[in-house]
Amino acid sequence: MGRYVARRLLQMIPVFIGTTLLIFLMVHWLPGDPIKALWGDKVPDPAQVEALRHKYGFDLPLWHQYWNYMTDLFQGNFGETFGGRQVSDVMGEAFPVTIRLAVVAFVIEVVLGITLGVFAGLKAGKALDTAVLVFTLLVISVPVFVLGYIFQTVFGVQLGWVTPNVRNSEDITELILPGAVLGSLSLAYVARLTRTTISENLRSDYMRTALAKGLPRRRIVGVHLLRNSLIPVVTFLGTDIGALMGGAIVTEGIFNVQGVGQQLYRAVNQGEGTTTVGIVTVLVLVFLFTSLIVDLLYAVLDPRIRYA
Amino acid sequence: MPDVTKTPGTAAESAAETAAAAGEAAVVAAPASSGKPRSLWSDAWGDLRRNPFFVISALLIVLLLVMAAWPSLFTSTNPRNGDLTHHFLTKPEYGDVFSADWFGYDKQGRSIYARVIYGARASISVGVLVTIAVTLLGGLVGMIAGYYGGWVDSVLSRVTDIFFGIPFFLGSMVILVSFSDRKVWVVASAMAFLGWTQIARVMRGSVITTKQSDYVTAARALGAGTGRIMFRHILPNAIAPVIVVATIALGGYIAAEATLSYLGLGLSEPTISWGIDISDAKDSIRDNPHVMFFPAGMLCITVLAFIMLGDAVRDALDPKLR
């Protein structure tokens, strides 16, 4: 177990370096001059441009910039924005908001998705199954931004159940609507995945044995069937945490949630590379560690899986 | 070698004879095994034809493709022609089928109906181009990684992990923001650059399974070259899961293009796209919801059609999942 974790952690290093290098190159190599863009339509003063280039290190060769960035990063320094704020401060404000939103979305997705999936899987081929299939098909087909406007108009403006925009992100009730929108697509995938594995495992030998032993139906479904069927679902859910945090750009824009997505949108449009690379670096770390935790969870769910 | 001395005519005759003999054999064998064994593909086609979801989605897709290829069949109104006497205060004339007034007018007095029809081309082109590019690129990487294994596989798999680690939307935004004139091929390339990883992983897994089959060993024992084994023996038998993933992804790419255009980082004017129109309509959604409703509705129907097609293809090619 310990050796397995150590090996996985070592394998993460090249992927982490590669991903940060790739996003670094994408931000800095592609055409577009963020320093000149700071002047807008005005004619920039060449001396000031040079001074700023030097300040942000843009006058160095790209490999040198990346080296500086990484050495700073390992000392906990994410650099600063064009406005002079520390990127770590910007992230410190934005990440708690996005994490709350992602947690709300995640809870909705897990509870509703698995429930729908289990009921559809148990009744495979029946009316309920078809209803869940059509429901998930519709949810997958409606893009997030369309769904966001529909929910906002119907529940926020016309019915008035919730405020159309999030004013205070610490109030969880205000995050339910954007959370539902953010989690909707994954909810549909979770429901479908659960349904497929449940209906497949229903025919397995251990189910027949459990039934033959005379166990109550609740225990058969709740323990034997569910535990065995959750492995692919847990895999999906694990990789989805990072996706929910990075994919909130549209949802946060519609509902005015001041989180990571809004900061990213601003940073990408202004060509402010330090913020973009910083946030992506954190998201990549989240992604790498959740995939490791998911792999370790396999052994908990299925004792046949052992890590040497 | 007797074949060399034969004239082409007799070669053809003997071929015909063999075919006839085979036909006879088949007729003789018919009662026992009901004709020649059906392949995965003909089996799948038989399933598909009987699937109502497939029939509906195929009809919708044919209609959408016709719309994308010849939009002028559906409307004679110029979608770029803004007439401010209409403005978006002119509400839709719902009964007036196929006229320019049918869906109403947008902020600049352009016919929404005409724009919805002309928008099909850009959206579907991006979806199809990305899917083709991703299948070729991811398929090639997955094939090489799966076939050679060893250090080649290790390197290619790590590269795949690296690209997989970049969030798709975010990466596309970072690339696209540096282009001011974002045509269909620019948006498609940016999306394909980051989107190939899933296909590569699926292809790699599928190739590794297929590689161990007896017919591959047999082909190698008979002296077939690497290229022949890869493309004539492994590819046809390993491609099914890739086709499933690619078909389902097509609908997702159309939605992704619209989302990028909505954020102002997808296609740019003067291209007509549903995403751009939805983005333009968002400021007036409270008073004029119809301006957003029609392009958004068309987008949803298109994505739905492709996802339904993908679902049907998956059910047909992978009966285990049903």
Image: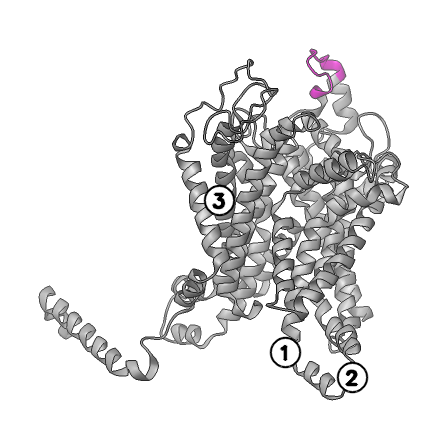
Where disc 3 sits, the SS reads: helix
> Label 1: how many residues lie within 10 Å, few (<14), some (14-19) or many (20+)?
few
Eyeballing the image, is B109 above or below A58?
above
- In magenta, the rendered stretch is A36-48
Give the foreground label among 1 and 3. 1
Magenta segment main secondary structure: loop
Q: Position of residue B79 (x, y in %)?
A: 48, 24
- The amino acid type of the residue labelled 1 equals Arg
Residue lying furthest right: A170
**Quadrant placement of the C terminus of chain A:** bottom right
Mark 3 and mark 2, same subunit? Answer: no
- The amino acid type of the residue labelled 3 equals Val
Q: Numbered disc 1: what chain?
A: A
Disc number for residue B128: 3
Disc number for residue A203: 1
Residue B37 left/right relative to B201: left
Q: Position of residue A58 (x, y in %)?
A: 72, 28
